[in-house]
Image (cartoon, coloured by chain):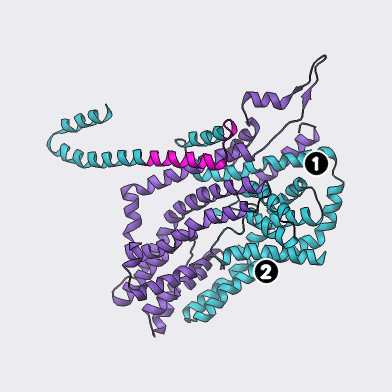
Chain colours: A purple, B cyan
Amino acid sequence: MKITKNVSTEDRKMLNSIFWRSFTVFASRAGATKAHAPGFMYSILPAIDRYYKDNDKAQADALTRHTTWYNITQNVGTFVMGLVASMEKKNSEDPNFDTESIVALKTSLMGPLSGIGDSIFWGVLRVIAAGIGISLASQGSIFGPILFLLIYNIPAILTRYYLTYMGFTLGDTFISDMYKSGSMQLLNKAASTLGLMMIGCMTATMVTFKSKLSIPITGGKPILIQTYLDQLWKGLVPLAVTLGCYWLLSKKVNVNWILLGVLVLAIVLGLVGFV
Amino acid sequence: MLKTAILAALSVFICFGGNWLWGQTMIERPLVVGLVTGLIFGDVRTGVMMGASLEAIFMGAVDIGGALSAEPVTATVLATTFAITLNVNQKAALAIAVPIGVFAAFISMFMKNVVMNLFAPIIDKLAAANNQKGLVWAHFGMWFLNYFVFSLVTFFSVLAGAKPVQHLVNSIPKNLMAGLSAAGGLLPAVGFAILMRMLWSKKLSPYYFLGFVLAAYMQLPSIAVAAIGIIIVVIQWQRDKQIMDLENKQNTQGTLATETNISTEDQEEEDFFS
């Protein structure tokens, strides 16, 4: 790809090193104030070592800068790492460089990048991969989990790799240009459309409910409640429960209460002989 | 039982710790955890099937923005362990897994936000002294500590819980069992609801129902629905791009028009909508 060829050999060596280290970015978590700062520092050490060679003071300053809170969807976070590397480079060359801009830019990118990263990787790619994986695995096939891992990881790792380079070469204007030109909104819309369709599909196939209740009729076959429910609208109960959970969530009800609520509801239905 | 407990704890450490040590590659998702636990206990089929059921339940259990939701790894390992080693009915094992997941989430939160806070000043000191070796050690040391403690939770749960759980499951009446099975069927709804919160908007909501109808009435497999979805997205993208380009063009022309003659702009707008 063109984007990795325009980079000098030493830069490429450094960026590859950042790419590999970035896999461990969320390994540690230094509490609520720093989150994944140690992982971020570990990932960009190659840049700090390179640009502040033999300057203990400058290296310590750079490290201290990056002890602040860090958290971005992993696979798009490498964009920030590449960008920070290029800014640290500028800082090492220009004595008047405003070092606060490095932290400011890094922090300001966390929200928008995680927003797009979470919805694409967590909301869509993982959901599609899991949907396909579950349908195979529920029959006991080992290809379920394997296919799940492949469908998710191949695009995820490629994104991680190319964004490391894009952060370094395209720099700070790239994301805001994406927003301004509107392609970010298009990307978001596409991701949400696909994600919602898959969730609808999975609501139909994976949320299951069957009532065994029957109404006896004198001189005829008993009426099964489930047949009526199915005639009314197929998957009526699963759809209603899913939309109900969504409604409760949007009313800011804690997830765990909803989980336990569904559990209790099902048990009560079982105890009264409805299911 | 000691051996079972150690193996279950190992399974948690491999999947949970491994996932976060190596790039969040999704080996902590129930689908994969079930496979790994099944391999460790020598019953891959049960493991994979348990993983599939739990994946559907915990699909939406994403730790976004620190929101507390049930923790899937411990739940999957314990449910699979009970199903394989104690021969507990799979559906009952599922229902047991959910409260365990909620409990484990509290421990996870406690480790992340309370215990790990102790390391924040250490990181500051190491950075100020440019002690890079120390930073690397702290980074991986924290990783080991966090997931080791987590594995201990599983270890003690299996050690202490196996007998009571087996006893409990044996004494479950038929109606309650039916309720637990129904719970296993309905719980994925919560996971999907969490995902919908991430993606839902009024304008796009018809696509949710389209996906539902395609699967419920047309009986299409999920790969087919995904393919149809991709086709729709491509068409949508092309049309939106066209509209966007037209709007951008119109805006630049529009500003020119207001400077010279306002009526031109109105005319253009009418042309555009006709």
- The type of residue carrying mark 1 is Met
Q: Residue at x 55, y 76 (%)?
A: B122
Q: Residue at x 78, y 63 (%)?
A: B4
A228 versus A61 height, above or below:
above
Residue A154 can be seen, yes or no: yes
State the extent of the magenta-drawn residues as a range.
B215-237
Q: Which mark is residue B177?
A: 1
Residue A95 spot, x, y in % from top left: 29, 77
Say which quadrant the N terminus of chain B sits in: bottom right
Output the chain of dot 1: B
Whether the magenta-drawn stretch holds residue A226 is answered as no
Q: Are marks 2 and 1 in contact (CB under 8 Å)?
A: no
Q: Which mark is residue A123?
A: none
How far apart are the two marked residues, 2 and 1, measured between alpha carbons? 35 Å
Residue A16 spot, x, y in % from top left: 43, 70
B40 versus B127 height, above or below:
above
Residue A271 spot, x, y in % from top left: 80, 36
Residue B112 spot, x, y in % from top left: 61, 63
Q: Estimate how packed mark 2 is, as few (under 14), some (14 to 19) or many (20 or more) residues with alpha carbons within 10 Å.
A: some
Q: Which residue is mark 2?
A: B148
Quarter residue B218 falls in: top right
